[in-house]
Image (cartoon, helix red, strand yellow):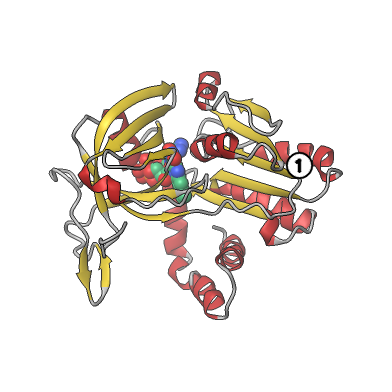
Amino acid sequence: MTDNPSGALYAEVVATERLSPHLVRIVFGGPELSGYEPLNVPDEAVVLWFPRPGQERPAPVTEKDGVWGHHDPQTAPEGRNYTVRAFEAGENARMTVDFVVHPGGVAGEWAVNAQVGQELLITRPRCWYEPPADAKWILAAADLTGLPALARIIEECPADGPQVHAMVETADADDLAALPTTQCNAHSVDASVGTGNGVAPGALSDLIAAKLPELLGQGPGYVWYSGEAAQSRAIRKLMRKEHGWPLERVTTVGYWRQDAERWAETYQKVGGDQLVKVYYDAIEHGLSNAEASELLDEEYERAGL
Ligand SMILES: Cc1cc2nc3c(=O)[nH]c(=O)nc-3n(C[C@H](O)[C@H](O)[C@H](O)COP(=O)(O)OP(=O)(O)OC[C@H]3O[C@@H](n4cnc5c(N)ncnc54)[C@H](O)[C@@H]3O)c2cc1C
C-alpha cells in the first residue's frame, strides 16, 4: 500500500458468484486496489470493514496521535478477517474473497446480499503459513473458513517441495467443489462432510491424530490448521503436548468461534481484558507472536474460555 500512510484502501464489488451451498465468492476492484501490496503467502488475510446500517460505505480511517484507525465509536464500521483467495496486481487490480454463508453475522449477511458497486474498506494484511525449510511433508487442515487458504496452499505448493496432505471439513459435499483440481506435489485430500462448520462437532483434530502415524515416519513435517477455535486448540495441544513438537512446526489459527456470543459473555465475566495482559507481557519479554498466543490460549483455557 505505497504512498498511503493509513494503509487502508476502498475496494468495490465487481462480481459475485455462488461457489457452493455455503460459499459466496466476491471479486473486488476499484481504483485504490492497485495500491494493495500482496504478501504472497497462501493464508494471507486482511481486515474487511463493513458499513454500518445507513452508511453508503464504511467510514474512512483517520489519524489521531500518530495512530491510524476508527477513533469515533459512533461511526466506526465492523471489521472481520478474510483470506485473500486470489490477487491480480495491476491498474485494474482484482482481489477475490470467498465468504462462508452462515446464519447471523455482519460479514456473512453482507456477502450473500452483496451487489456490484458496493464498497468495503481493506486494512492490515497478515499471514502465518511458514513451513520449515527441512519439512518433508505438510499436513494442512481447515474447515470452510480456512478452505480459501487451504486452496491456495494446494495451488501454490512447489512441485519439488514437501508433499502436501490436505484435510478439509465441509458442511455439504457440494462445498468440496471450491477446492482446486490442479495437483501439486503428490498431495492427497481427505474430506469430512457434515462435520464442524456450525452444523456438528468438528472432526479435524481426531482425523489429524489418526493420520499422523502414517506421516511421522516420513521425516520432519509441518502441521497447519485454520478454522474453528476449539479445534485449533485441540490440534495445537495434540502436536505440542502429545507429540512434543516445537512451535515452528505447528501453525494453528482460530478463525471463528462456535457460539461466539456465549464465549463473549464468559469473557466479560472472567475479566478477559486482564488475561490479555499475558500476551503483551510475553511480547515485551521478547517472545514471538506464536509463543505469546499459545500462553494466552492456555490462560483462556484455565479461565474456562
Ligand atoms: C485470519 C483469518 C482469515 C479468515 N478467512 C476467512 C475466509 O476467507 N472466509 C470466511 O468465510 N471466513 C474467514 N474467516 C472467519 C471469519 O472472520 C469469521 O467467521 C467471522 O466471525 C465472520 O463474521 P460474521 O460477521 O459473519 O459473524 P460474527 O458476527 O463474527 O458471528 C455471528 C455468529 O455467527 C457464528 N459464526 C461466525 N462465523 C461462522 C462460520 N464460519 N460458521 C458458522 N457460524 C459462524 C458465530 O459463532 C456467532 O454466533 C477468517 C478469520 C481469520 C482470523
Q: Determine the residue located farthest toward the right in the rendered image.
A: 217
Residue 231 seen in the figure: no
Q: Determine the residue located farthest toward the top in the rendered image.
A: 174
> Dot 1: within a 10 Å radius of its alpha carbon, few (fewer than 14), some, or many (20 or more) residues?
few
| Secondary structure type for disc 1 | helix
Q: Name the residue at 33% across, 50% down.
A: 36
Measured along the vertical axis of the image, is residue 288 above or below residue 142?
below
Residue 238 seen in the figure: yes
The residue labelled by disc 1 is 209
Left or right: residue 160 compared with residue 103: right
Q: Name the residue at 21% across, 41% down.
A: 119
Ligand 1: quadrant of the figure:
top left
| Between 69 and 7, the one nearer to me in the picture | 7
Left or right: residue 217 compared with residue 38: right
For the N terminus, the quadrant is bottom left
For the C terminus, the quadrant is bottom right
